[in-house]
Image: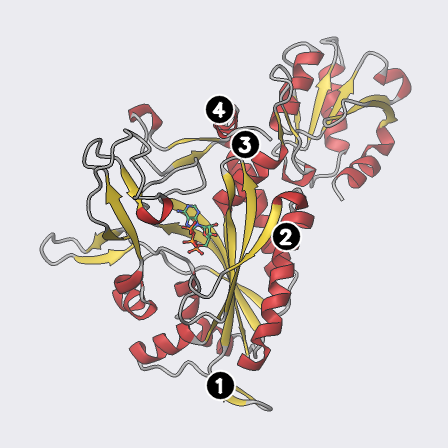
Amino acid sequence: MPNLSEVISFCTRKGFINQSSEIYGGLSGCYDYGPNGAQLKRRIENIWWNENVENQENIIGFDSSILMRNEVWQASGHVSGFHDPMVDCKSCKSRYREDQIDINQNCPDCGEKNWTDIRQFNLMLSTKIGAMEDSAKQVYLRPETAQGIFVNAINVARNSRMNAPFGIAQIGKSFRNEITPRNFLFRVREFTQMEIEFFCHPDDAPDFFEEWCSRRMSFYTESLGMDSAKLHFRDHGKEELAHYAASCRDVEYDFPFGLKELEGIANRGSFDLEQHMKHSKKNLTLSDPQKGKFVPSVIESSAGVDRTLLAVICDSLDVSDPNHIILKINPKLANIQVAILPLVKKDGMPEKAIEIKDRLHSSYRKKIEISGSIGKRYYREDEIGTPICITVDGDTNNDDSVTVRYRDTGKQDRIKIDSLNELLEKVFK
Ligand code: ATP
């Protein structure tokens, strides 16, 4: 596996990710996605959305606003309880999350032991809405997408004529004023979450919790094709569990900087809806012909797109030969899926390449690449993860065939142009 600095340098160099406002020195904890990164991020989101919304009859998609009334965050407990403990080193001014270091030891930065008291730091970022400075109202930027679902859930269910069990899924930006953003995309201040709140009768919650855990694990292993040996479940112990949660299990990935959370799956009981009922005084119960009236329990799965994308890159980046780096990413996730490389700049060649490109199925993202020697072109495509290269050469016009080269093995096959779509179907199945 590559180390983190190899991953960062690869991502910056190859147009995946760079720091926000880079030309002004960068903004800590915020990143921009370049052409290869934006496409990878979108592909991960689309696979999640297709799997959980497009292909599920009892899960609906949702898109709530980032700014909400402050009552939402009071009811959810974020105003009073969304804190991290913070300590500063008085000698070198480094700042840490107290739960991530040992303050009985010396400062990891300067080696002295000169800590401030532990202070609680609220992670919510805020802004103001309204034109007049003095009457403008302070509002929070949401620290999770979940509450936008909770405050709408019962209305949405009634309007969509859904009965429990049903789910509401959302992909969107969340913001946290992390004390120490670190490990590249792993802990940032602006990130994208993919969350599903699954509402069911309380009696059914333990079974649905187990079902969601296995569905979510197979998202990483089957749908994204990540290495199952690097993915693990971790159950929260009693002391770690939120007071309202019956169970909580993290999906963890073996990152170059250690085993860390990718996603949290929790049986939250009816806590969130009860809280919003209490604060809004609205009726947030469901009624069922057999089970009568009840406040549904919620199984939540909350995944970070940025952390997933980082894990996907760590999982597939082969740096064993520094002169020939290969991103062995799942073909479905590659930005360019088929590169067509005309070998000779002779009359008729670009036209032939265009003709072949037009004959390939429209669902694949394709490009024609003419610059550089063929070897250099192969290496460039390997580095950004293009799974298939099709080389058009001097014989193509005579034998109606091309050379197909596979990214992970470098193996080449001579294939009739007519059979290309069939071959691609197998590669991208
Ligand atoms: P951590 O303990 O790592 O701070 P958390 O338990 O607070 O994470 P949740 O509130 O459960 O995280 O958020 C759900 C998911 O959202 C996380 O599993 C992660 O993928 C993503 N996420 C949360 N905070 C961040 C962040 N600062 N940067 C990137 N992704 C994040």
Q: What type is the residue that disc 2 sits on?
A: Phe
**In the rendered image, which residue does mark 2 sit on?**
219
> How far separated are the C-alphas under marks 1 and 2?
31 Å
Instruction: For label 4, count other residues whose C-alpha is less than 10 Å away and answer few (under 14), some (14-19) or many (20+).
Output: few
Residue that appears at 74% across and 40% down: 428
Give residue 190's mark.
none
Residue 151 coordinates in the image, percent (x, y) = 39, 70
Q: Is residue 123 visible?
A: no
Among numbered discs 4 and 1, the one appearing first in the sequence: 4
**In the rendered image, which residue does mark 4 sit on?**
9
Helix, strand or loop status at disc 1? strand
Left or right position of 212 against 248:
right
Q: What type is the residue that disc 1 sits on?
A: Phe
> How far separated are the C-alphas under marks 2 and 3?
22 Å
> How far separated are the C-alphas under marks 2 and 4?
28 Å
Give residue 36's mark.
3
Q: Is residue 230 above or below residue 164?
A: above
Among numbered discs 3 and 1, the one appearing first in the sequence: 3
